[in-house]
């Protein structure tokens, strides 16, 4: 399992090809702090739903 930081998850959510390939071909995990940073970056409920749909 590979621990990934917020920037990799953000790249994935922005459809960055390298991040997509990496995440989809690896067993990854994130820390609670990364989860909080991602949630703090959401500006509305739609973004929170998209994050939940893609991360969990």
Image (cartoon, rainbow, N blue to C red):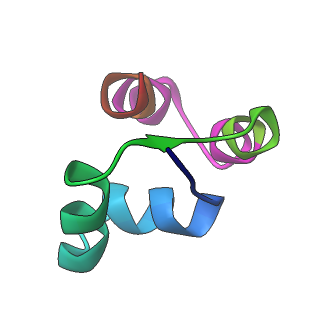
The reply, left or right, for residue 38 in relation to residue 50 is right
Image: magenta residue range: 37-50
Q: Is residue 49 above or below residue 40?
A: above
Residue at 31 percent of width and 69 percent of height: 19
Residue at 41 percent of width and 32 percent of height: 55
Name the residue at the front extreme: 1
Residue at 31 percent of width and 52 percent of height: 26
The reply, left or right, for residue 27 in relation to residue 20 is right
Residue 44 magenta: yes
Residue 47 magenta: yes
Residue at 73 percent of width and 39 percent of height: 31
Q: Is residue 32 above or below residue 49?
A: below
The reply, left or right, for residue 48 in relation to residue 13 is right
Name the residue at the right extreme: 33
Looking at the rendered image, the quarter that the C terminus falls into is top left
Residue sitting nearer the eye, 24 or 48: 24
The reply, left or right, for residue 17 in relation to residue 52 is left
From the image, give the main secondary structure of the stretch colored magenta. helix
Q: Number of marks in the image? A: 0
Residue 43 position in % (x across, y down): 59, 42
């Amino acid at each position: 399992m590979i621990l990934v930081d917020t920037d990799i998850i953000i790249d994935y959510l922005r459809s960055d090809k390298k991040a997509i390939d990496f995440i989809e071909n690896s067993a990854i995990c994130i820390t609670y702090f990364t989860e909080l940073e991602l949630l703090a970056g959401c500006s509305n409920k739609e973004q929170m739903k998209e994050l939940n749909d893609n991360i969990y």
